[in-house]
Image: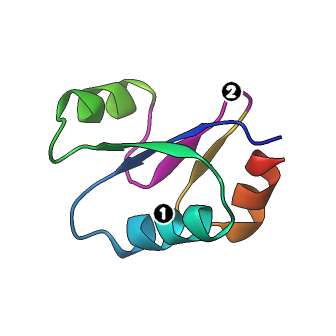
Amino acid sequence: MNKALTIFTKNGCIQCKMTKRFLAEHNIAFEEHNINNQPQYLDYLKQQGFQSVPVVMSQTATVVGFRPDALKELAQ
């Protein structure tokens, strides 16, 4: 059972690209918010205390950066 994840990314971010590729290769559904195209999400991330992307959020946890081990955990 896959839960939909939300991923916050920015243009030119290698870790963001790797995270999206990992999720796609593992058939993990996600909704992407690019802070370059949707700057309101930059404010949201700052309010939550995040200073870098990618930020991957599920209903129960958050992963910052490209962390395949943690992403697999989120998908379960």
Looking at the rendering, the stretch of residues picked out in magenta corresponds to 49-60
Residue 20, labelled with which disc?
1
Query: Position of 32 compared to 61: left or right?
Result: left
Compared to 6, does 74 lie above or below? below
Compared to 60, does 30 lie above or below? below
Dot 1: element = helix
Lower sequence index among marks 1 and 2: 1
Rendered location of residue 7, percent (x, y): 47, 45
Residue drawn at x 41%, y 64% as measured from the top left: 16
Residue drawn at x 69%, y 69% as measured from the top left: 68
Query: Position of 46 compared to 56: left or right?
Result: left
The quarter of the rendered structure image containing the N terminus is: top right
Rendered location of residue 62, percent (x, y): 63, 41
Q: Which residue is mark 2?
A: 59
Compared to 10, does 45 lie above or below? above
Binning the other alpha carbons within 10 Å of mark 1 as few (below 14), some (14 to 19) or many (20 upward) gives many
Residue kind at label 2, given as amino acid type? Gln
Camera-side residue of 57 and 76: 76
Q: Looking at the rendering, which quadrant does residue 14 occupy?
A: bottom left
Residue mark closest to the camera, 1 vs 2: 1
Proximity of marks 1 and 2: CB atoms separated by less than 8 Å: no
Report the Cα–Cα distance between label 1 and label 2: 18 Å
Rendered location of residue 41, percent (x, y): 29, 31
Binning the other alpha carbons within 10 Å of mark 2 as few (below 14), some (14 to 19) or many (20 upward) gives few
Compared to 60, does 28 lie above or below? below
Disc tally is 2
Q: Looking at the rendering, which quadrant does residue 25 occupy?
A: bottom right
Predominant secondary structure, magenta span: loop
Residue kind at label 1, given as amino acid type? Lys
Residue drawn at x 75%, y 42% as measured from the top left: 2
Indicate the colouring scheme.
Answer: rainbow
